[in-house]
């Protein structure tokens, strides 16, 4: 689906807390799975992405962790 559009912290939060707060219907698994188990699930999901999608996700995730730069008006 569209999981590759979200950085890892958002994927972890959604798996832990569920999708209901975001308007979805997926339940949260934070009380049933450890953080390590949830990371294992996310790694498995990502292992099914084509290489191009994983590269795009990785680039976006790196950018999500950086502060925004002002737009140059030159």
Image (cartoon, rainbow, N blue to C red):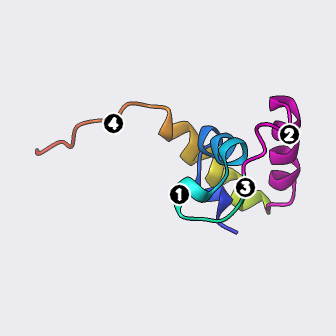
> Considering depth in this image, is 42 or 24 the residue closer to the camera?
24
Secondary element at tag 4: loop
> For the residues marked 2 and 1, what is the alpha-carbon distance in whole angstroms?
20 Å
Q: Quadrant of the C terminus?
A: top left
> For the residues marked 1 and 4, what is the alpha-carbon distance in whole angstroms?
24 Å
Q: Residues within 10 Å of mark 2 (few under 14, many from 20)?
A: few
Question: Mark 3 against mark 4, which lies toward the viewer?
Answer: 3
Q: Residue furthest front?
A: 31
For label 2, the residue is 32
Q: Reading the chain from its start, which is encountered first: label 1 or label 4?
A: 1
Q: Residues within 10 Å of mark 1 (few under 14, many from 20)?
A: few
For label 4, the residue is 68
Q: Which mark is residue 27?
A: 3
Are the residues at dot 2 and dot 4 in contact (C-beta closer than 8 Å)? no
- Based on the displayed image, in which of its 4 quarters is residue 17 positioned? top right
Q: Residues within 10 Å of mark 3 (few under 14, many from 20)?
A: some
Determine the residue positioned at 22% across, 37% down.
Answer: 70
Where residue 52 appears, as percent x and y from the top left, is 71, 60
Secondary element at tag 3: loop
């Amino acid at each position: 689906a569209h999981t590759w559009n979200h950085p890892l912290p958002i994927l972890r939060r959604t798996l832990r807390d569920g999708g209901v707060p975001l308007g979805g219907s997926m339940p949260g698994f934070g009380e049933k799975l450890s953080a390590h188990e949830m990371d294992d699930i996310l790694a498995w999901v990502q292992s099914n992405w084509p290489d191009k999608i994983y590269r795009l996700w990785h680039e976006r995730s790196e950018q999500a962790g950086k502060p925004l730069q002002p737009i140059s008006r030159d």
